[in-house]
Amino acid sequence: MAFSIKDWSHLGRMQVASDAVVFTVLNNELQVLLIKRRYPPFKGTYALPGGFLQQHESPEEAAIRELREETGVQKLHLHQLGAYGDPKRDPRGRVLSVSYIALADHHRKLHSTTDALRADWFLVHNLPKLAFDHAKIIEDALVHLRLEIQTTNIAYQILTRKFTLSQLQKLYELILEKKLDKRNFRKKIKELDLLEETKELFREGAHRPAMLYRFRDREYKPLSEKIQAFL
Amino acid sequence: MAFSIKDWSHLGRMQVASDAVVFTVLNNELQVLLIKRRYPPFKGTYALPGGFLQQHESPEEAAIRELREETGVQKLHLHQLGAYGDPKRDPRGRVLSVSYIALADHHRKLHSTTDALRADWFLVHNLPKLAFDHAKIIEDALVHLRLEIQTTNIAYQILTRKFTLSQLQKLYELILEKKLDKRNFRKKIKELDLLEETKELFREGAHRPAMLYRFRDREYKPLSEKIQAFL
DNA sequence: CCAAAAGTGTTGGTTTTACACCCATGG
DNA sequence: CCATGGGTGTAAAACCAACACTTTTGG
């Protein structure tokens, strides 16, 4: 073969990492999962969970592994957001990051580990100072998320298995950052035919109990043709 | 600094490349720009223009440079499509590709160069066998393009500076792969307020001449709020 | 005068929005 | 019995889809 490893020597040394932007709803707020870095660069600063690819890993596999290692969170569905390749984004040298988005329900237990001092949820609109270009990545992830929530059924990934329509509506309102009309919301959701009633009721507080629903399918699907579910 | 270059040695060697999917309309068909590879791997096979990043280049800069070097095409606006990082996608070893989409008007002159035997336009729906995972990349690019043409003003990048409404409609029909109603199309386009009349007429053939239009702004913009311009 | 593409409005159906009251519960 | 969130329908407005004929030209 005319090309071999050594022919690449004139090219810049480069490493590839994966990062994950994991959103949840906790305390009625949209939150994002961050770790406090144990090692330089940016030691002590918060950052997205992520790290370098190992020899035989795809970027997605690396993101899944790093998530598990650094935060204990696993079994999430990741969607690629894009590649971040500015030559100056990492002070160590050339590191390109492939970033992913995921949604988690807030019952996920977080644990700290070797690479991270701690893993915690942060309010999307009140983030600490972040390492690298991670603030920009989260910003992009939010835009992406707003599109996805309206064109796919990803909401199932963030809610518990059974939920009330009010909880679902609240999720949409948090992500879209706008109030939705209760009756119109319910009409639309029911037309989409994604949900089914459980026959159970959810009781809490001094008011009428709410019907619990579940997603018919707990796997990623685009919503059929109807591009815009809510505006 | 606790981490330095040498600490990366346990990680897989990896190289990063950029590829560009350039679309145009030529002979009333949607076409893609491909090069015939001069060197292995896949010597003699068609592939997307692209190549390895140099030391201080961002992936976008590399894509622009490779496009110019391999095809002579320049001054295009690129939009990132995503990263392709399957460990097996390149027989030489680990090569991650960051892929970009661009539109070109068909007057661009193509020239062949050192790395490529030739650069040519190919019908999107009649492509030759392609190197690497480039067939998949083009497929993804088409989906992306269909979304972009409906939510942004990128059409300006593919048409000549002045054009008729019929030419514009044809462009949408080719990308969306469906016929559009002439009157509805014109109504919508005029509402979007992206175009202005030149006072010139375009004459060709034995029929009434058409008014020539131009885009008010020749820079990338999302269409305001109205997510779906055509269905 | 013929063929060919340019140009132009209206209507019916569908979708979206705005809006207000009764219900069931716990305390 | 009261405060709280759950649950429900309708009417007006906006939007979308379907549709046909006249105009201008070159040959």
Image (cartoon, coloured by chain):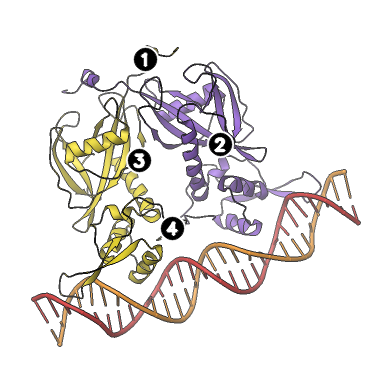
Chain colours: A yellow, B purple, C red, D orange
Q: Earlier in the sequence, mark 3 or mark 1?
A: 1
Name the amino acid, label 2: Phe
Residue at disc 4, secondary structure: loop
Residue beneath label 1, please?
A5
Instruction: Please name which of the two marks, 4 or 1, marks the residue nearer to the observer.
Output: 1
Q: Chain of mark 1?
A: A
| Secondary structure at numbered mark 2 | strand
Q: Are marks 2 and 4 on the same chain?
A: no
Q: As rendered, which of B56 and A165 lies closer to the eye?
A: A165
Q: Which residue is mark 3?
A: A80
First in sequence: mark 4 vs mark 3: 3
- Which amino acid, mark 3? Gln
Q: Quadrant of the N terminus of chain A?
A: top left
Whether residue B220 can be seen here: no
Taking the spot 43% from the left edge, 14% from the top edge, the residue there is: A3
Mark 2 in CB contact with mark 1 (< 8 angstroms): no
Cα–Cα gap, marks 4 and 1: 48 Å
Query: Which of pointers 2 and 1 indicates the residue nearer the eye?
Result: 1
- Residue B42 lies left or right of residue A143; in this view the side is right
**A218 over A188 or under it: above or below:** above
Q: Chain of mark 3?
A: A
Residue toward you, B84 or A198: A198
The residue to which callout 2 is attached is B23
- Callout 3 secondary element: strand
* Tags 3 and 1 on a common chain: yes
Image coords of residue B201 (percent x, y): 73, 47
